[in-house]
Image (tube, rainbow, N blue to C red):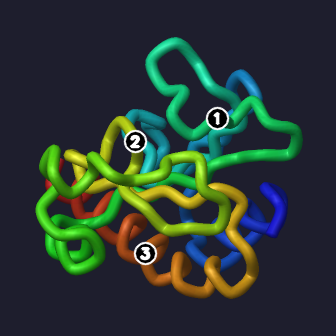
Amino acid sequence: MTEDDITRHIIDSLGGGQFVVADDNTFFFHGADNKFPFATIVTKDDDFDSASKLNRLGVFRLNVGVGKETFRALFGEPDEASIANVDYAALDTLMPHPMYGKMHWVSVINPSSKTFEKVKPLLTEARSLAAARDKSK
């Protein structure tokens, strides 16, 4: 899967949202306020987030904000123990987000089509959670 494939899927399948590209990263939002993305595609390391080694040629990370129960079902409690032994640079592996795992974000670096099939319901959930948050405002 490419960044464009993923962006197309999110926009086409989860209609009603929008995306913003900033500094070569893509942020997907439910509403028009562009405040809290439900998913992102990040293409490079920065000072506070370099565990994924995104500065490798052609590497990007898809990040998705899921619900607490979904995160727990995938990885257990989002504590130090559950995230300590993760290889955050592994390709095509669903994992807790290296910085925001404690906030129930999941990540996958360069997902294959097969792995992306597993991510699709997580994107749907993330979009639904964002819609519910927007509605409750």
Give the class, few, some or many, for how many residues have Cα within 10 Å of label 3's Cα (few <14, many ≥20): many
SS assignment at label 2: loop
Residue 52 image offset from top left, x and y in percent:
57, 40
Q: Which of pointers 3 and 1 lies earlier in the amino acid sequence?
A: 1
Disc 1 and disc 2 in contact, CB within 8 angstroms: no
In the image, what residue occupies the spot 55% across and 65% down?
16
| Residue type, numbered disc 3 | Leu
| Residue type, numbered disc 1 | Lys
SS assignment at label 1: loop
> On residue 98, which mark appears?
2
Distance of mark 1 from mark 2, alpha carbons? 11 Å
Q: Which residue lies under the disc numbered 1?
A: 53
Distance of mark 3 from mark 1, alpha carbons? 23 Å
Residue 95 image offset from top left, x and y in percent:
43, 61
Q: Which residue lies under the disc numbered 3?
A: 122
Q: Which of pointers 3 and 2 lies earlier in the amino acid sequence?
A: 2
| Residue type, numbered disc 2 | Pro
SS assignment at label 3: helix
* Viewer-closest of 131 and 9: 9
Residue 98 image offset from top left, x and y in percent:
40, 42
